[in-house]
Image (cartoon, rainbow, N blue to C red):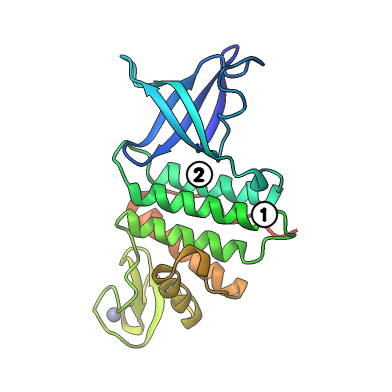
């Protein structure tokens, strides 16, 4: 579940991400009553097996729910909860239709499981890097992966010095107009993050991660007209 909002006296509207139907909205009736048959099962970031009834309206009705994984540890850790909310927000906004993307569903399950596994062990190390690697994989699933192998404008393979949202990837010195400077480390981070699993996200300095985040942001702005919240909460 991505989100849950109060509705009426005792109901909730849920935003769900499903393997077969993409993002759907459903109403859970009476769920806020103490004796609801759903108990405490319908909570954000839960992985659930849900039965939905399709009526005449676009809103589905929840008729049954079983917990697959409540991610209990994550729920006791404010930073992990914040990271889970940002991951769910990115999925909900980048994949907001009912077009199925089972790969995105699996990616989100994996990210939530990793956050749960690492929760409660002090400050989340590498939280921003992990969130950015997750976003890069979402871009790939959305068909928006930045071009990294060669200049996105002219195909030059060397002297790649910038990143251009309009061109959709890294650009060379001759094509850098309209781009911002991208350090080799940021290039390496993006390449490795896309090639490796979510559990093996490479480490990188904050300056480098800021460039990666900007590259993701300009790609989304140019090609999906979408602006996401920052990938991670500021470190306090
Ligand atoms: Zn070029």
Alpha carbon distance from label 2 to label 1:
19 Å
Rendering coords of residue 114 (x, y %): 56, 56
- Write the residue at 30% across / 42% down: 100
Q: Which of 1 and 162 is in front in this view?
A: 1
Q: Is mark 2 on a helix, strand or loop?
A: helix
Q: Nearer the viewer, residue 178 or 219?
A: 219
78 versus 170 height, above or below: above
- Write the residue at 62% across / 66% down: 126
CB of residue at label 2: within 8 Å of ligand 1? no
CB of residue at label 1: within 8 Å of ligand 1? no
Label of residue 119 in the image: 1
14 versus 111 height, above or below: above
Q: Can residue 179 be seen in this view?
A: no
Rendering coords of residue 99 (x, y %): 29, 40
Rendering coords of residue 134 (x, y %): 47, 59
Q: Nearer the viewer, residue 197 or 95?
A: 197
State ligand 1's quadrant: bottom left
Nearest to viewer (mark 2 / mark 1): 1
Q: Is residue 127 visible?
A: yes
> Mark 2 = which residue?
89
Rendered-image quadrant of the C terminus: bottom right
Name of the residue lying farthest toward the top:
9
In which image quadrant can residue 43 be found? Answer: top right
In the image, 163: left or right of 37? left
Q: Which of 138 and 224 is in front in this view?
A: 138
In which image quadrant can residue 120 be found? Answer: bottom right
In the image, 81: left or right of 190? right
Label of residue 209 in the image: none
Name the N-terminal-most of marks 2 and 1: 2
Please tell me how crowded label 1 is: few (under 14), some (14-19), or many (20+) other residues with Cα within 10 Å. many
- Write the residue at 54% across / 50% down: 112
Please tell me how crowded label 2 is: few (under 14), some (14-19), or many (20+) other residues with Cα within 10 Å. some
């Amino acid at each position: 579940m991505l989100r849950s909002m109060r509705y009426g006296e005792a109901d909730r509207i849920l935003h769900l991400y499903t393997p077969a139907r993409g993002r759907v909205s459903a109403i859970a009736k009476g769920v806020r009553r103490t004796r609801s048959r759903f108990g405490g099962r319908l909570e954000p970031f839960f992985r659930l097996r849900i039965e939905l009834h399709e009526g005449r309206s676009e809103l589905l009705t929840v008729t049954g729910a079983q917990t697959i994984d409540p991610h209990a540890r994550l729920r006791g850790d404010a930073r992990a909860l914040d990271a889970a909310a940002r991951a769910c927000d990115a999925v909900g906004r980048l994949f907001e239709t009912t077009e199925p993307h089972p790969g995105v569903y699996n990616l989100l399950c994996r990210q939530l499981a990793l956050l749960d596994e690492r929760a409660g062990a002090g400050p989340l190390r590498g939280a921003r890097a992990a969130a950015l690697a997750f976003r890069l994989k979402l871009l790939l699933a959305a068909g928006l992966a930045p071009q990294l192998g060669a200049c996105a404008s002219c195909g030059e393979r060397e002297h790649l010095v910038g990143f251009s949202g309009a061109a959709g990837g890294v650009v060379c010195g001759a094509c850098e107009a309209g781009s911002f400077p991208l350090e080799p480390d940021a290039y390496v981070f993006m390449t490795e993050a896309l090639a490796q699993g979510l559990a093996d996200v490479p480490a990188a300095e904050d300056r480098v991660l800021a460039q990666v985040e900007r590259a993701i942001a300009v790609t989304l702005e140019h090609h999906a007209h979408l602006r996401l919240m920052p990938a991670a909460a500021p470190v306090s």
